Image: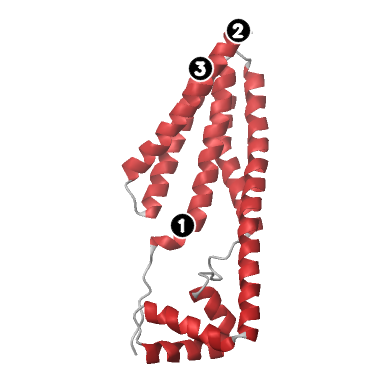
Amino acid sequence: MSHINRESHRAGRIGWLRAAVLGANDGTISVASLVVGVAAAGAPQGTILLTGVAGLVAGAMSMAAGEYVSVQSQADTEKADIEKEKRELEIEPEHELAELTAIYESRGLDQPLARLVAERLMSSDALGTHARDELGITETLRARPIQAAFASALSFVAGALIPIAATWLAPSARVAVVSSATALGTLVILGGTAAYAGGASVAKGALRVAFWGALAMGLTASVGKLFGTVV
């Protein structure tokens, strides 16, 4: 009896990887930038820590709401397309069969075989076949708004806890420096890990994320210093 070896492909990781990396990076960069900006303005450590916690709560809720609305819109579109396809299958089954046959022909099958495949698949699961091959909608890749919202919020919190912990543990005179260094180190790890999981260059991934994080913290530190001097 032959055994089928299942191949492992990185494309299957794209969905969760995108949400996790985006949330964690955003949490680290956003909260670290807030902390560094307020520290540069000369605020006391307690105020800096409070700012970080407020940024964590606001950012997590913003990420959850934004991801939910975005993915729910996608889910609504998918549902509408599937309902439309269901009606067309009931009203014009022959037209839908010809449409599916044409799809398989465009993928390299000759007309008789393409029609045979279309007939066999439609006889077992017409709606699922059209959803997959005509609309590109599969159960694995279906939009899941609540799952996406929770994943984004939790990953944001995980990323934001790093600069908050650094602010809490750092000497009061070194909050900005310690928070910046900790955040940059975290971003390098996150960027490198995401690149490795996606099969890309680890060095490029780490440097790309660290660059934008450093830029964000540098700009907010400049603003904090400017307004701190004015106030």
The secondary structure type at the circle numbered 3 is helix
The secondary structure type at the circle numbered 2 is helix
Disc 1 marks a residue whose amino acid type is Ile
Q: CA distance from mark 3 to mark 2?
A: 12 Å
N-terminal of the pair, mark 3 or mark 2, is 3
Disc ID at residue 14: 1
Q: Where in the figure is residue 30, as x and y percent of width and height? A: 56, 33
Q: How many marks are shown on the rendered structure?
A: 3
Whether residue 120 sits left or right of residue 188 in the image: it is right
- Dot 2 alpha-carbon crowd within 10 angstroms: few under 14, some 14 to 19, many 20 or more: few
Disc 3 marks a residue whose amino acid type is Ser
N-terminal of the pair, mark 1 or mark 3, is 1
Disc 2 marks a residue whose amino acid type is Val
| Residue placed under numbered mark 3 in the picture | 222
Q: Are marks 2 and 1 in contact (CB under 8 Å)?
A: no
Whether residue 219 sits left or right of residue 93 in the image: it is left
Which mark is nearer the camera, 2 or 1?
A: 2
Q: CA distance from mark 1 to mark 3?
A: 36 Å
Which residue: 59% across, 51% down? 151
Does residue 174 sit above or below 54 in this rendering? above
Which residue: 59% across, 30% down? 164
Q: Where in the figure is residue 195, as x and y percent of width and height? A: 38, 48
| Residue placed under numbered mark 2 in the picture | 230
- Dot 3 alpha-carbon crowd within 10 angstroms: few under 14, some 14 to 19, many 20 or more: some
Give 169 or 186, whichever is nearer the viewer.
186
- Dot 1 alpha-carbon crowd within 10 angstroms: few under 14, some 14 to 19, many 20 or more: few
Give 200 or 112, whichever is nearer the viewer.
112
N-terminal of the pair, mark 2 or mark 1, is 1
The secondary structure type at the circle numbered 1 is helix
Q: What is the quadrant of the N terminus in the image?
A: bottom left
Which residue: 39% across, 60% down? 10
